[in-house]
Image (tube, helix red, strand yellow):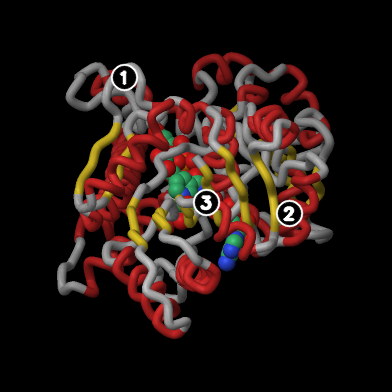
Amino acid sequence: MRVTVFGIGYVGLVQAAVLAEVGHDVVCVDVNVERVENLKKGIIPIYEPGLTPLVQRNFDAGRLQFTTDAELGVKHGRIQFIAVGTPPDEDGSADLQYVLAVAKTIATYMVTPKIIVDKSTVPVGTADKVGACVSTVLKERGLDLGFDVVSNPEFLKEGAAVADCQRPDRIVIGTDSPAVESKMRELYAPFNRNHEKLIVMDVRSAELTKYAANCMLATKISFMNEMANLAEKLGADIEKVRQGIGSDPRIGYHFIYPGCGYGGSCFPKDVQALVRTAEKVGYVPELLKSVEAVNSRQKEKLFTHIQAYFGGDLLGKKIALWGLSFKPNTDDMRDASSRVLMESLWAAGAVVQAYDPEAMNEAQRIYGTRSDLTLMGTKESALNAADALVVCTEWNAFKAPDFDLVKERLSHAVIFDGRNLYDPAMLEQQGIAYYGIGRGRSVLSFS
Ligand code: NAD
Ligand code: UDX
């Protein structure tokens, strides 16, 4: 099938490449000229395991094209995906300007009927807005062309995006039209072979499904972070508690890892956006507001521990930081906990020596050259003459460090572990002070 994807970011690029791989003929359109030119040269704009060869192979085979020519893109696909960003606006609502700009573009150039697919995460009612926008432009053009707007939210996780798109748990399709459902079934047939993965529903329910999924997962994390904070006060170890509750299949082991807060381009903005959606219809979403509040507080946790350890005086302290990305296997630093930590450290007069396996260019892009941040080439060099080590991201490379070397290089043998990677008892034996998240009596009482 001929498919067009607007927006060549984490979602659009991965989705396009995965569709091309199964034989669809995909044109990707983006307004970012540099991104498009780089992709044509084989330079992939994001780090995502398995993505580079997938894109290259399909580009070379001519099944995957990149362009800034929106007219060409609109004319190409019967199916037009909208996969552009929906960042928070000033009050936390999803900003639909990019989605509606694409809708307008499609309406401006279409000369045959189109199926317009909202792949971006958008509030309930957005398909109606997209439809209204397309109708208005078509009317201005004096055309009476058929079109449908479908909600098809994306559930991929960064760091596993290719695998998630190739083997989705489910494919949610929001449409009331049997003809559109049939086209979407044809599109996704290669991903729907072994058992039925398509869940077809009305558009509004599909739009809400995406927010409900992300908010449920964020809720699990904030709940565990609340338990971790309690464990710290009560002298319990949250890691033991996690195992104890996860073994109940009704709870499960997924998404109950406590830590220094959830980040990324989805959970923070989607929880906020659903809160705003609820408020706009006169509902007070107490639980969601608390999920957000607990997470904001959690992102300050490491700083609070570090500050307490150094008696409130961080002026001139050098902090080694392992992990800048919001999670492992990605270079994405959107809403990363590392950023909240670094900004608090800088405000307190500390300097940071940071290392991340993939996010160094992104850190450079965001922070440029500033005297209180040094990006180091290795995790070992980040330790040089530092006063403490802080771990913000659970990259594999950080899971079994040479603790003798850590001790030797740090001027204070202390680790603040935002992802509970290490065994407190083992570090105590090595003579390294250790502060995890919710690790009971191994954590100093700072009050
Ligand atoms: P992104 O910022 O990585 O990419 C968006 C792309 O859209 C950019 O390349 C931008 O230049 C392009 N763009 C903006 N306006 C455009 C226009 N008018 N025409 C063509 N291209 C345009 O965004 P993302 O992370 O891929 O997220 C896209 C959407 O998918 C968001 O709604 C997000 O919430 C949702 N989502 C993201 C993830 C994720 O893990 N990143 C997962 C599921 C859903
Ligand atoms: C999320 C959803 O998982 C995905 O389905 C959706 O499409 C996009 O948003 P992503 O943001 O890529 O994916 O990463 P995810 O693995 O969900 O992690 C999000 C954040 O939660 C990270 O900062 C991670 O460190 C944190 N997290 C995750 C925890 O703190 N504890 C956990 O148990 C799991």
CB of residue at label 2: within 8 Å of ligand 1? yes
Q: Is residue 92 or residue 82 the one in the foreground?
A: 82
> What residue did someone put label 2 on?
35
Is 139 situated left or right of 327 in this image? left
Disc 2 or disc 1, which is closer to the eye?
2
> What residue did someone put label 3 on?
77
> What residue did someone put label 1 on?
243
Could you say which quadrant of the image residue 56 lies in? top right
Is 267 situated left or right of 234 in this image? right
Q: Amino acid at mark 3?
A: Gly
Q: Is residue 337 or residue 25 the one in the foreground?
A: 25
Q: Residue at x 37, y 60 (%)?
A: 122
Q: Is residue 207 or residue 181 the one in the foreground?
A: 181
Q: Is residue 351 or residue 252 the one in the foreground?
A: 252
Counting other residues with Cα less than 10 Å from the Cα at mark 2, is it few (<14), some (14-19), or many (20 or more)?
A: some
Q: CA distance from mark 2 to mark 3?
A: 21 Å
Is 141 situated left or right of 177 in this image? right
